Every structure is written in structure tokens, then in C-alpha cells.
Image: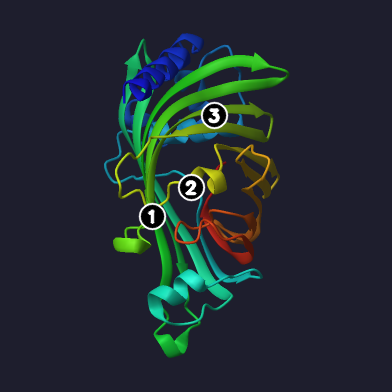
Amino acid sequence: MRIFVKRFLFILMFIFLITPELPLRAQPREQASESASKNKSETLPESKASPPSLFERRMVFEKLSEHNPFVILPHKPTYLLPLTYNTSADGSTFKSVTGDDIQRAEIKFQLSLKILMAQNLFKENGQLAFAYTQQSNWQAYQFEQSSPFRETNHEAELMLSFFNDTHISGFRNQMNTLGLIHHSNGRTGKFSRSWNRIYVNFIFEKSNFLVSIKPWFRIPDKTKRDENPDIEKFYGYGEILTHYRMGDYTFGFVLRNNMRKKNKGAIQVDWTFPFYGKINGYFQYFNGYGESLIDYQDSTNRFGLGIILTNWL
């Protein structure tokens, strides 16, 4: 436990030292209806002229919602994939729970929300936020078995973020975050899966290209009830996320890796495209381990098509 506390304090001190004093000042209530480009000069450092980058644009809109009590912010992408197909579905865990065979076709959806709890914590910089993400896999086409939910995963997340303005090889380090995640499937007994981890997330941006480098450390579970002692070997020790916007289209890529000789991890490829109004079409491809907690030890090869409501940028 002492080692964990020392690592936590060291990471916090490191982020604080490398982050310059970049105020993101609060906006008056009457300015909330103005565009992000007009407000950028008052919410972000004046050294960066308009137009704002895509990441800055998102931060400005989040700031403008500060005085609106009816707004809950998006965190990770929120989407619905009514058509997904897993070519490598194992199904043994699902059958041991329900007694039924798994269907390769199912519905997958994710809901992710965030609230800002405190801002300007350190020298007019630093914000504290809480986020909740739910991902579900629904055997909706199992009509004979009442269409059961195969798995639902929950992530509760606490984040301390610092705005930054460091340039590295043409990329601008926009934000650094220290976070704590509780990840669980909400079950009990032998089908329970959960783990806690701390992470640091370094966000870089160049034009319409975003890169997130996010290593993490699992908080040791020394109890005899550790349901998944080897989860890092399959889920990996961090992830790299890239996101690129080209007009009305976006392309994303996520890589997780355990950095071992017996290589395991996952890749995810995302593509969004115009569909109807503010709703975009969404194609997702996932290959690897850890798509859901209940079968994190089983490899998944899934294609999905649907809609996305909120995205990274």
C-alpha cells in the first residue's frame, strides 16, 4: 500500500511540474450562447490565435456549460450498434451462466457521461471531474430465451486534469490527466469481474489529429476474492488512442498491449460518417481480448454497424 501511495504522489507531482500556468477562465452566464471561436480568446491562452483546434473547441463548449444546471457532458463515445457479429464467439462462459448457446449476432451499445466537479484548483489550472461509462452486450436476437443481456460493464472514473502548452515534434500537448477507475461487471460469485487502476493520460493534438497515450497501473487486490488476477496479461498495461477528423468523417484507432512475449491486447478501428442531422453512422471493428470483462480471456473478432451520438471530437 505504501508503494502505491508513493507512486500516486510521484505521478501527481510530475504532471503538476510539467504543466505551465494556463488559465481556463470561467465565462459569464450571458456569454454562454456565443460560438466557441468567439469565446476561445477568453477561455484559452491568448498566445494561440483563432480558429480553435478541435480539442480546444470541445474544451470551450464544456466550459460554456459550467453555469447550466441541466447539462451533463459526454465523456467517451456514446453509440448504438444494432448489428454486430463476432466471428470468434466462444460462448462457454455465457452458457455456464444461462445454459444457452451464445449467438454470434448481438447488439452492443455504450453510454458515457461526465460532470465537472471543481475547476482552477492549482494556480488557475486543474479541474476535477467524475465520469461514468456503461457498455452492454445484448443477445437481442435470442428470441427463444427472452433476449438476455450477455454482459454489462461499468466504469466509474475520477479525473484530475491539467491544461498544457508543450510542443513536441510538431504536436501540442494539450492536457495531462491523472485518473482512478473502478471497472466491474456488477455480478457476484464466480461470474464477478472487477479491478481498480490508476492511469496517466497525455493528450497531444496536431491540426485535426488527436493522440492519447494512457499507461495504467493496477491497484493490487490482495484479498482471496480476486476474481481476475491475470487480467492485465490480457487487457494490457495501457492504450494508445488516435482520432482523425476529415470534414464530416472521423477515423479512430485504439491499441492495447501487454508488452510480453506471449503478446495479447486488442485493436479497435472506428469510422464515423454523416447519417441524419446530428446523428452519424458508425462502423466499429474490434479484435483481441478484454472487449467485455466476463470473457476477458477469450479472443473476440467483432464487426459492428450503427449510429454514434457523441464522439471524441
Q: Is residue 246 left or right of residue 43?
A: right
Which residue matches tag 2?
231
- The amino acid type, in three-letter code, at marker 3 is Glu
Give the image location of residue 284, x and y in percent.
63, 58
In this rendered view, identify the residue nearer to me: 231 or 54: 231
Give the image location of residue 256, x and y in percent.
61, 43
Which residue matches tag 3?
56
- The amino acid type, in three-letter code, at marker 2 is Ile
Residue 35 makes an appearance in the image: no
Instruction: Give the distance between the C-alpha atoms of the residues marked 1 and 3, in whole angstroms.
Output: 37 Å
Q: For the residues labelled 2 and 3, say whether their Cβ atoms are less than 8 Å apart.
A: no
Residue 206 makes an appearance in the image: yes
| Sequence-first disc among 2 and 3 | 3
| Sequence-first disc among 1 and 2 | 1
Q: Residues within 10 Å of mark 1 (few under 14, many from 20)?
A: many
Q: For the residues labelled 1 and 2, say whether their Cβ atoms are less than 8 Å apart.
A: yes
In percent of the image, x 46 and y 87: which residue is there?
143
Q: Secondary structure at mark 1?
A: loop
Give the image location of residue 113, x and y in percent.
39, 47
Height in image: 298 above or below 119?
below
Mark identifier at residue 193: 1
- The amino acid type, in three-letter code, at marker 1 is Arg
In percent of the image, x 62 and y 41: which residue is there?
257
